[in-house]
Amino acid sequence: MKCSVWLGQGPREAVATGPQCNRLKEKMMKMKNYVSEFEAFLEGYKETHPNVEEDQRRGWKIWWDHRLDLDAVDRQKKDSVPPNPYYYS
């Protein structure tokens, strides 16, 4: 009897025969149900602080999701003074 189990990582799969097949399936199920200490902490933190994700999204929008004035960026590049090749001189 040949048994193959997908590991959940791309096209690779584990192949076993006979009684090893059942042990392999059990091991894979344990791995799928495994929750790390850090992941459990994050899930608990999100449950006790429901506004965290909203705050993260708001912060992301403030720093990254904004429109740039390309003319202002070009002016800033032209107006800046080039740095000295040796910083401490």
Image: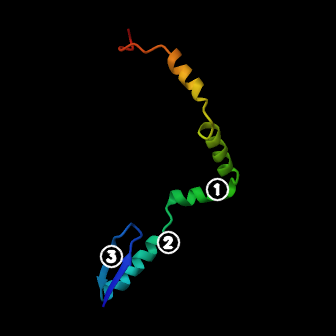
Counting other residues with Cα less than 10 Å from the Cα at mark 2, is it few (<14), some (14-19), or many (20 or more)?
A: few
Name the residue tied to disc 1.
46
In which quadrant will I find the C terminus? top left
Which image quarter: residue 27?
bottom left
Q: Is residue 6 left or right of residue 39?
A: left
The mark nearer the N terminus, 3 or 1, is 3
Residue 19 at x, y = what percent?
32, 88
Check if mark 3's residue and mark 2's residue have beta carbons within 8 Å. no
Identified by mark 3, the residue type is: Ala
Circles 1 and 2 in contact, beta carbons < 8 Å:
no
Residue corresponding to mark 2: 33
> Which residue is rendered at x = 58% and y = 56% of the image?
42
Q: Nearer the viewer, residue 83 or 18?
A: 83
Q: Earlier in the sequence, mark 3 or mark 2?
A: 3
Q: Which mark is residue 4?
A: none
Q: Position of residue 34 (x, y in %)?
A: 48, 68
Residue at the outermost front position:
71
Helix, strand or loop status at disc 2: helix
Give the residue furthest to the top.
89
Q: Nearer the viewer, residue 78 or 55?
A: 78
Instruction: For mark 3, give the secondary structure.
Output: strand
* Disc 1 to disc 2, C-alpha distance: 20 Å
Q: Type of residue at label 2?
A: Asn
- Residue displayed at 39% across by 66% down: 9
